[in-house]
Amino acid sequence: MTHRLSRFKSVCWIILYWFEFMNLSVVVVVEVMSMVETGRGGSFQDAIKIFKMLPCIGFVLLAMMKTYKMVRCRNIFENIIYEMRDMWNTDSIDHDERQLIGSALRSLHFMVKGFYFCNNLLLVTFCSGPFWEMVKRYTGHENEKYLQLFYWLPFDPLQPGYYEVMLAVQTWHSILTIWANMGGDLLFVIFLSHITLQFDLLSVRIKKLIYVPHDDQLLETYPLGLDSAAYLEKYRLAMETFSEMDWEDYYAKEIAEIVLRHRALIRLSGDVENVYKVALLVNFINSSVVLCFCEFCSIVVEKWNEFGYKSFLATALSQMWIMCWYGQQLADSTERLSHAVYNSGWYKAPKKIKRSLLIMLLRSQKTVYVTTCGFSNITMASYSNIIKTSWSYFTLLLNIYIDSDEKQQPR
């Protein structure tokens, strides 16, 4: 996103993006038309067919929204990347900060790889069915042709020639949709991960701000005692030469830098929310319905050895989980700032510095959240609510299906 392209390449990429955007727009239109035509049948089997369409339409709409925001708000994305890059200072990182960075980056690497694998597994399992049936036909087996996606078309897509073309087109549409969703979600996760890490590094810096000498109350084995020992080793010369006024000036300068960094991180969190809030709102509203229909299709429609909607369900669950997990991590990291202020050696600071630390304590107690247009916070509690809601919808739908099936059975 931060690559500087020539004007010609930039225009080519924009043209390609809008071509594919219109391509997905046509997909939404033909799937909605197919859904309306199917709904005119009125039977429960037609309703099941609609249930299979809805998760696909929801995923396509989300892909369009996320990619549009990435193109429309590119300057905001670039500013977040540049500001986060400038916050890294590898020259003065101590052991605790290095361990914190290593742990956060390893966790992010694991999450990104897992999410990437889950989405590509969905792509393979969802699209491979028609290809596998095609291979079986070429080897002499008799089976019916079918397409994984339901498009309204003015011709029969199962006719020879048309079928192969439509299969390739639908596969390309699936690739576009899944990768666009994955790219938007991973960018959101990476932003929150780095902002969370910077909040945690700020907490470490605050805890080590004030030096407290060891005595009968503060033993060397206590966390603050260990920090004070490291502080004494790092600033031994300053401990011997600085006057009280020098230390007060030093603390005031450090607090000013911490406050500016804190404000910058809050602003960056707000920027991430502003560019994602509409997509997140649609995602949260859509997820309960998508999960419900994926659960229904996995149990009722698909056979035990078919994995298209089962992988769809796993991907939808992982998508919501990874976003809510990092939203929760962001909220927890901002709360840890107030704990860091309280656990620092504030009681040994000059009176003026104590007042500044008190203001910091009050401000840091306000948790920073990423929200869905202000309706709900992106946290694990929200994820739990989505799971419970989708399960309620699913059980209701399953009971309706069982009652309908019993009525159709001959007595």
Image (cartoon, rainbow, N blue to C red):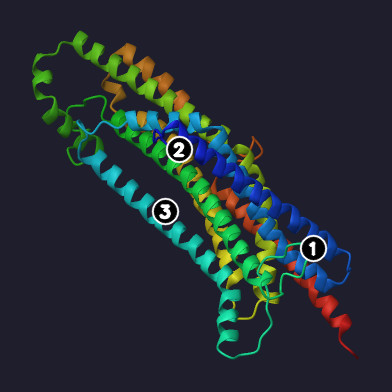
Which tag is nearer the camera, tag 3 or tag 1? 1
Q: Secondary structure at mark 3?
A: helix
Identify which residue is drawn at 17% across, 38% down.
220
Whether 271 is drawn above or below 281: the answer is: above
Residue 82 visible to the viewer = yes
Residue 378 visible to the viewer = no
Specify whether 390 is left or right of 231: right
Furthest residue in direction top, as rendered: 245
Q: Earlier in the sequence, mark 3 or mark 1?
A: 3
Whether 217 is drawn above or below 47: the answer is: above
**Which amino acid, by three-letter code, is at mark 3?**
Val
Q: Quadrant of the N terminus?
A: top left
**Which amino acid, by three-letter code, is at mark 1?**
Pro
Residue position for label 3: 112
**Which amino acid, by three-letter code, is at mark 2?**
Lys
Specify whether 376 is left or right of 367: right
Q: CA distance from mark 3 to mark 1?
A: 41 Å
Q: Earlier in the sequence, mark 1 or mark 2?
A: 2
Identify which residue is drawn at 52% across, 46% down.
184
Residue position for label 1: 154
Disc 3 crowd rating (10 Å Cα; few below 14, some 14-19, many 20+) is some
Residue position for label 2: 9
